[in-house]
Amino acid sequence: MDLSTDFDPAYGSAIALEPGIIRVTANNPSAFTFMGTNSYVVGDGASCFVVDPGPDDPAHLDAITAAVGGRTVDAVLLTHTHRDHSALARRAAQAFGAPLVGGAGIRSQAGQETGDVVLDAAADRELVFDRTLDDGAILNLGGLAVEAIATPGHASDHLAFALGGTGVLLSGDHVMAWSTSVVAPPDGSMRQYMASLERLLARSERRYLPGHGGPVERPAAFVRGLLQHRRMREAAILSRLQAGDRTIPEIVTAIYRGLDPRLTGAAALSVLAHLQALVADGAVRSSDAEPSPGSMFELR
């Protein structure tokens, strides 16, 4: 799996990626969002739709509005309700006179945090959709048949959107070319994330357009690499438990050498997600009935 960080965000500009597909990147770079959140305007006729309006930034709304032009906006879609994608969503839907549409997953009432670290991508639990989509729902938007594909794992309500007849999948934060996804309990689930990758691997889209960074150009090979990466991470965690590590901080220190300190909390939550899956599978024992960042772990 070769990650690609070669990306020009061109803040405020409408970048044509495919016929009828425009990307506008928000100026909200961070350790979690890379160069910023990608919003997409899709449709090549009199109507279009907007995907992931992004952070609550009036300048970004202006840039999306310019990309829409004089067209009718059929809907504002969200891949998931992490705030770097959703904070502008209700304002954008009102500005365009369009329904706000997203996934039917259950957003956890607990924060995504460990110790004193809270992820930038914490879920917006207050956002209310005009319509929620189940897996396999088909919407006719912007002259395209848009299929909603439930891809929980990074977030419980995560959806990918297949643009019928184009070979393009809007993959949100589930698959990105620049980095592996953060899988952070309680809203994230490692077993769901792996199952969602397997679902996409069975599909035939030729190109993924993600929520951050540039396109994934060879998605089948890339998704196989993501699956292998997670299996190797799981094996490394089991190896550390065998070596005597008992806590998540010990495991993070051992297997995430050279990690950006800003990502230590995310790494701890990712290890927790792996351990939760291993406990559920019966391979690992936890000191607590519900494994948490402060639990002790050992091999069964």
Image: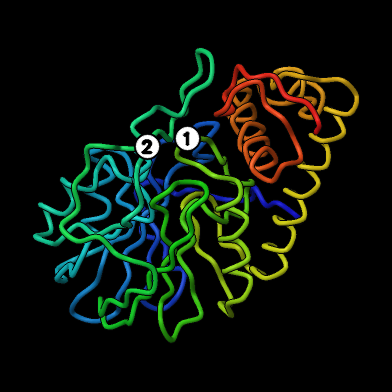
* Residue reaching furthest to the top: 116
Residue depicted at x 55% and y 53%: 192
Q: Residues within 10 Å of mark 2 (few under 14, many from 20)?
A: some
Q: Which mark is residue 108?
A: 2
Q: Is residue 56 above or below residue 206?
A: above
Q: Are marks 1 and 2 in contact (CB under 8 Å)?
A: yes
Image coordinates for residue 212, horizontal then vertical, percent = 50, 49
Neighbours of disc 1 within 10 Å: few (<14), some (14-19), many (20+): some
Q: Which residue is mark 1?
A: 186
> Viewed as shown, does residue 68 lie left or right of 218?
left
Disc number placed over residue 48 in the picture, else none: none
Relative to the observer, which residue lies in front, 300 or 242? 300
Query: Image point 81% across, 46% down: which residue?
Result: 232
Q: How is the image coloured?
A: rainbow
Give the CA separation, mark 1 to mark 2: 6 Å
Q: Position of residue 43 (x, y in %)?
A: 30, 75
Residue projecting furthest to the bottom: 165
Q: Earlier in the sequence, mark 1 or mark 2?
A: 2
Q: Quadrant of residue 207?
A: bottom right
Residue at x-position 31% and y-position 56%:
104
Q: Nearer the viewer, residue 146 or 25?
A: 146
Residue 279 point in image, percent of width and height:
67, 37
